[in-house]
Image (spheres, grey):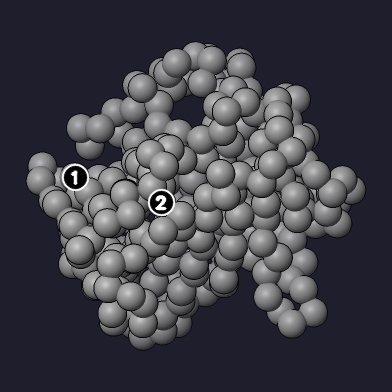
């Protein structure tokens, strides 16, 4: 049996013979669902998520490009909305590559490619960040694993600076029994403590209040990035790996921030998500005319 891919009404669903599935809205190329063969849903999606393209989808894996967070006013991205335009633009489905070409057995993975280029942007958006670019976003579904890769091309004759991040809302049973391993000794910017920089001292990050931190874990000696492990009740539930993405934002808005978010439902939903956001956001990546950049992350379900 082969993987199946269905696209209708700007929503794409891919399914493996094993039962693993992924759903992607062409709006924002937002992954809204990732299920493994036991039927478990591993992404949190707000029940009030707006899915009609009028605002970014609250949950799943929104894409952040070309700027993370509120753009610096004096920067070239200064006129863009928070987290940039990738998550609130319509992308096109470029097609699937079956797994043979990926060097895997025929039926245990499928790669879905999505594209967004400057020519596809609304005029108003293009005027706010007037650079020619091409994005190819690849989502690869394998048994128990979801990989997200962004390829950024500078198609103009001017260099541009950008940030890029995968804003993944992982579904957890109970945030108070959830921890993240692999951050020890990593510096982080703490948005809850006026963006001051600290160093993580604990081997396991746990959650008891609003948490909004951009970690930059030191690469290991062979220059590879250390995998992060999310545990629930002490058992490994996700392994998050990165290539070319030096930063990881860890966010849970907690009770009050979530209560104030109109598109976040149910209101106790803050107990059942943890954003683990691999990205390149602690500095700007400068892309020369004609050059390309690539960043990849993967989420593996261990439950
Ligand atoms: O990734 C963390 C963060 O930057 C938080 O500060 C919070 O703003 C969150 O993203 C959600 O941002 P949004 O623009 O989707 O409401």
The relative height of residue 241 versus residue 155 in the rendered view (above or below) is: above
Residue 124, how many percent across, how many down?
24, 49
Whole-percent x and y of residue 140? Answer: 36, 63
Mark 2, other Cα within 10 Å: few <14 / some 14–19 / many ≥20: many
The residue identified by callout 1 is 11
Above or below residue 103? Residue 76 is: above
Q: Is residue 286 left or right of residue 102?
A: right
Residue at disc 1, CB closer than 8 Å to ligand 1: no
| Quadrant where the C terminus is found in the figure | top right
Q: Quadrant of the N terminus?
A: bottom left
Which residue shows up at 41% across the image and 58% down it? 143
- The residue nearer to you, when weighing 287 against 276, is 276
Judge left or right: residue 253 versus residue 6.
right
Picture mark count: 2
Query: What residue is disc 2 on?
Result: 63
Q: Secondary structure at mark 1?
A: strand
């Amino acid at each position: 049996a082969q993987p199946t891919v269905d696209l209708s009404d700007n929503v794409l669903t891919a399914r493996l013979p094993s039962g693993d599935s992924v759903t992607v809205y062409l709006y924002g190329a937002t992954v809204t669902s990732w299920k493994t063969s036991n039927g478990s849903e591993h992404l949190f999606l707000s029940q009030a998520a707006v899915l009609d393209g009028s605002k970014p989808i609250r949950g799943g894996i929104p894409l952040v490009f070309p700027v993370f967070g509120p753009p610096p006013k004096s920067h070239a991205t200064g006129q863009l909305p928070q987290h940039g335009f990738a998550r609130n633009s319509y992308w096109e489905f470029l097609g699937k590559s079956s797994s043979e070409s990926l060097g895997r057995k025929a039926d245990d993975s499928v790669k879905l490619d999505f594209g967004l280029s400057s020519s596809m942007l609304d005029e108003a958006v293009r005027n706010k960040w007037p650079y020619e670019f091409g994005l190819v976003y690849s989502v690869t579904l394998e048994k128990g694993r979801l990989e997200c890769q962004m390829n950024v091309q500078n198609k103009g004759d001017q260099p541009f600076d950008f940030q890029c991040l995968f804003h993944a809302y992982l579904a957890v049973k109970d945030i108070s029994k959830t921890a993240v391993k692999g951050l020890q000794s990593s510096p982080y910017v703490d948005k809850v403590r006026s963006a001051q920089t600290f160093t993580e001292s604990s081997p396991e990050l746990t959650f008891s209040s609003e948490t909004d931190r951009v970690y930059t874990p030191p690469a290991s000696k062979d220059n590879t990035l250390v995998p992060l492990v999310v545990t629930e009740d002490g058992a490994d539930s996700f392994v998050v790996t990165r290539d070319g993405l030096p930063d990881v934002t860890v966010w849970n808005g907690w009770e009050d921030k979530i209560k104030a978010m109109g598109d976040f439902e149910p209101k106790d939903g803050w107990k059942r998500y943890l954003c683990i956001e691999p990205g390149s956001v602690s500095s700007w990546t400068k892309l020369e005319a004609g050059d390309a950049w690539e960043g990849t992350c993967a989420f593996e379900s261990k439950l």
